[in-house]
Image: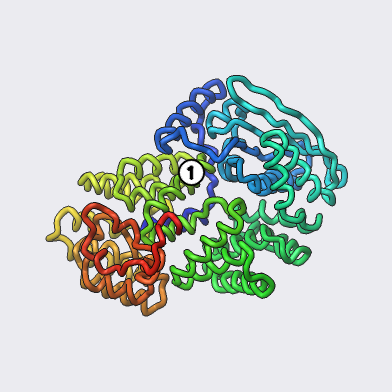
Amino acid sequence: MAGTRTARLIAALVMLPLVAVAVLIAVGVQRDQTARTAAELSARLDEALMRPVVRRGPGLVVLPLRNATGQNDLDYLADGLATALRQQLAAFADLTIIGDESSRAVAEHDLDAETVARLLDVDHVLAGAIRGSGEALSIELELTRLDDEVHVLWAERWSSATSGLPLTTRAITMRVGRSMLPAEALATVRSSLPEAPSDLALNDYLHGKYLIDRYNRDEVLEGLRFLARAREAAPDFEQAIWASIAGHQRMTWIDASLAQEHEARTNDIIDEYLSRHRETALARRLRALRASNDDRPLEALQEFQQAVQLDPGSFGFDRGYILDLCKAGYLTRCLEQAQGLAREDPVSAASHTALATVYQLLGDSERMLAHGALAQRFGGDLGDYFEGEALLARGEYKAAVKALKAGLTAVGVANEWVPAYVAGLADPARADDAVAAMRRVDDASAEWLDLFYAELAALGQLDLAFEMTATLIDERYRTWDLYAWGPAMYAYRNDPRFIEVTRNIGLLDVWQTLAPPDACAGTSPEPFCAAIPPPVEAVGEGQL
C-alpha cells in the first residue's frame, strides 16, 4: 500500500482522541513492576530513536499540576498552568522542553521523579499542585535535578488569585530559568518573553485549551466559546488564536455536518489576524497553513521556514510541516524534523506515527514497524496498519490482509477492498479483481475516490491511476498529497504524465527554487529526476 494513504491517515490520527494513552507503561502492571516496565520502555525508545541524542541543553518535563483544591471545575487550571509554563519555557532556546502529550501521559502513573526523568531522557522535573480556590489560589512547585543522585533544587509556593495568573506564570518561568541556565541566557529571554495577556484572557485560554484537547464534540464547542472570549479580551493573544484554529479544525473531523461552518470560522480568524499583522511569526505560519490547504507548496514551505526563523522557540516541531516536507520530496529534512518531534514528545502516539510514516516513505520497514508499535503502545490506532505494511514488504500476504484490515478499521476507513488488493499485489493476473473491489467502494461512497490512485499505481494500473489523478486535480483536491515516494510508486513517478502533473501544480517550481528533493539524491536517481530543472540559485536543502 502506498505512502500517501498513510500520510492521510496520520492526519486523521492527529485529530482523533488519544484516550488510550494510559497504556503507555503497561496495561495492568502492578506498582512494584513500574520501574522495570519504565526501564524496558526507555530501552525501546533508546533503540527506536537512536539515543543518546544531542539535546540543545538541559532537558525539563513540566508535569500537569495536581488539583488539590477539592473543586473538579478547576481541573482545567491545574492542567492549563502546566501548559502555559511549557509554552513560556520554550522561549529559552538552550532548554529542551518535553511536549504536552508525553508530559500528560507519564502523569497518568504514580512515578517518582527519577523514573520520569529516565523514561523521558531529561535531567530536570517540575511537579506540583494547586490548592485553595480561584480567588485565593496557591501554586506549589518542586524542581528536581537528576544526575548521579536526585537533588531537590527548590520547593516553593506562589499565592495568586486567578486574576494574577499572567504575572505568576511569568515569575515561575524566570525562577525555573535561573535554576537551569546561566545569567546571560536569562537576560536575553527576559526581553523576548511575550507580554502577558489580561487575566481574563489567560484564564479563558487555559479553560478553552483544556476542553478542545478532550476531543469530545460538546466540550470542544464549549472550549471554542472560551477561546473566542480570550481573543476578544486580547486580540493579539497568539496561543489563543492558534488554539481556536485547532479547535475549529478538530470540529470538522468530529462532526462532518459542521465542517463547512468551522472551515469558514477558521478563515475568519486568519483574515482578522492578518488584517492587523503581516510579518510576525504567527502571520507567516497562518499564511503557510492557508497556502498548504490551497495547494501552493512553494509559498507554504517558504512562509513556514520564515516563521521558524523569526521565532524558533514558539512552534517547535510542527507535524503538518513535517508531512509537507515529506510530500515535497525533502526526505532527509523531513526525517530530521520527525526525529526531533519524537525526542521532544517521546511518549506520544502522534510523534511515533509521524516517524513510522517517514520511514515507510524511505523504505525502512524495520524502523517503520518499531515506531508503529510504539505509537500503538501510546494509544495510537495505526500499529496494525504499519505491521500490515511491513508484512506486505516481506511478501507475507495472508498475514498482511488481517493486519491491514484491523488497522483501517481502527481509524474508521473502509477495508473490504483489502483482500482483493493484496491478492492483486501477490498475483498481477488478479489486478482486475482488485480494481473492481475498489470501484465498489467508490460506488458506495464517492469520497473514497481520492484514496485509490496510489493503490492503482502499485498494481500497475497506470492509466487508471493517472485518470484518477486528473480527476483529483480538476476537483481542486490538495494535489500536493499526490506524492508517495516508496518503491511501489516507481513506475508512476517515471511515467511522462507524472512530470506533467508535477509541472502543472507548480512543484517543479518548488524544486527549482529550493533545490531538487533528496528523493532524487540517491546513487541511481530515478528517470523523472532528470526532468527537475536545476536550482535558480545555489540554495541547499539544509537551508530550506
Count residues near mark 1 (Cα–Cα under 10 Å), then give few for <14, some for 14-19, many for 20+. many
Residue assigned mark 1: 342
Residue 140, relative to residue 499: is it above or below?
above
- Please state which of residues 161 and 212 is positioned toward the viewer in this rendering: 161
Q: Is residue 463 left or right of residue 280?
A: left
Q: Amino acid at mark 1?
A: Ala
Q: Is residue 461 left or right of residue 5?
A: left
Residue 28, relative to residue 452: is it above or below?
above
Viewer can see residue 376: yes
Residue most toward the left?
Answer: 429
Q: Residue at x 48, y 31 (%)?
A: 42
Q: Residue at x 35, y 70 (%)?
A: 508
Q: Position of residue 167 (x, y in %)?
A: 81, 48
Q: Residue at x 26, y 69 (%)?
A: 531
- Please state which of residues 544 and 367 is positioned toward the viewer in this rendering: 544
Q: Is residue 391 left or right of residue 56?
A: left
Q: Position of residue 492 (x, y in %)?
A: 24, 65
Residue 415, relative to residue 393: is it above or below?
below
Check the picture and name the quadrant holding the N terminus: bottom left
Q: Residue at x 53, y 38 (%)?
A: 55
Q: Position of residue 328 (x, y in %)?
A: 38, 62
Check the picture and name the quadrant holding the C terminus: bottom left
Q: Position of residue 467 (x, y in %)?
A: 27, 75
